Image (cartoon, coloured by chain):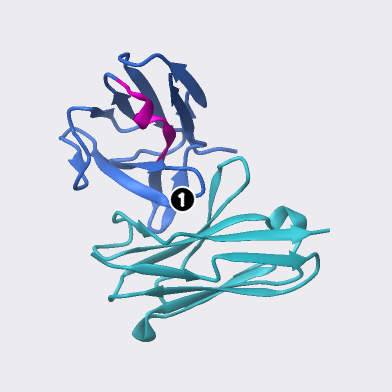
Chain colours: A blue, B cyan
Amino acid sequence: GAVVSQHPSWVICKSGTSVKIECRSLDFQATTMFWYRQFPKQSLMLMATSNEGSKATYEQGVEKDKFLINHASLTLSTLTVTSAHPEDSSFYICSAPRTIGDLHFGNGTRLTVT
Amino acid sequence: GIQVEQSPPDLILQEGANSTLRCNFSDSVNNLQWFHQNPWGQLINLFYIPSGTKQNGRLSATTVATERYSLLYISSSQTTDSGVYFCAVGVTGANSKLTFGKGITLSVRP
């Protein structure tokens, strides 16, 4: 079964609202989780590295005030898309390493901003 | 940053055929992984293979780190093998952040 759970699977929201996406490791503790964004028929682009108990590390070009990441426990990281706009519509995926080289992904969240 | 190139970009196979997917990378790495993304978007870790050869059923992978490439072999392909195959590399450790290639879209026809 799944070892990383991501919710919601899909969400439709109106422009200007905020959306929170949760990523949970189910049977292991994850001090680090990764958040990716994927546009249709494109590759995964790393947005940020979520670190338990400390600030996330954002990739160049990713707005930290727009994509808020919180890793408050060893099993939960959240990504909040603030004041969402249509251009934020995308497929967001989280991942967490269970052991060395054993990276597990959530099933992704398809965000549509209208 | 490191560049990851995958080839071919698209591949169409008849069920039962074999195939080789290639991943070239531009710098030394200490983490290389192959993933399969199914048509519903779910990503599955196939191999952690920064060097050497591994096999798992009909799939096997080889990484020649000194020559900066990795190969994923699929034998006796099945329709369920369809999807996108990503190669991803990291340079700062086994659980470091990964840079993904653009992927290889595989379609296996019955």
Q: Quick check: A96 above or below B110? A: above
Name which residue lies at 28% across and 41% down. A31
Q: Quick check: A89 above or below B14? A: above
Q: Quick check: A86 above or below B89? A: above
On screen, residue B109 versus residue A99, left or right, reads: right
Name which residue lies at 44% across and 42% down. A39
Name which residue lies at 74% across and 60% down. B108
Magenta residue check for B28: no
Magenta residue check for A85: yes
* Residue A27 in the image, given as x and y percentages of width and height: 46, 36
- Amino acid type at circle 1 is Gln
Residue pointed to by mark 1: A42
* Residue A111 in the image, given as x and y percentages of width and height: 45, 27
Check the image and name the residue furthest to the right. Answer: B110
* Mark 1 Cα-neighbour bin, 10 Å: few <14, some 14–19, many ≥20: few
* Residue A55 in the image, given as x and y percentages of width and height: 15, 35
Quadrant (top left, top right, bottom left, bottom right) of the C terminus of chain A: top left
Question: Which of the two residues, A71 or A94, is positioned nearer the viewer here?
Answer: A94
Magenta residue span: A84-94
Circle 1 SS class: loop
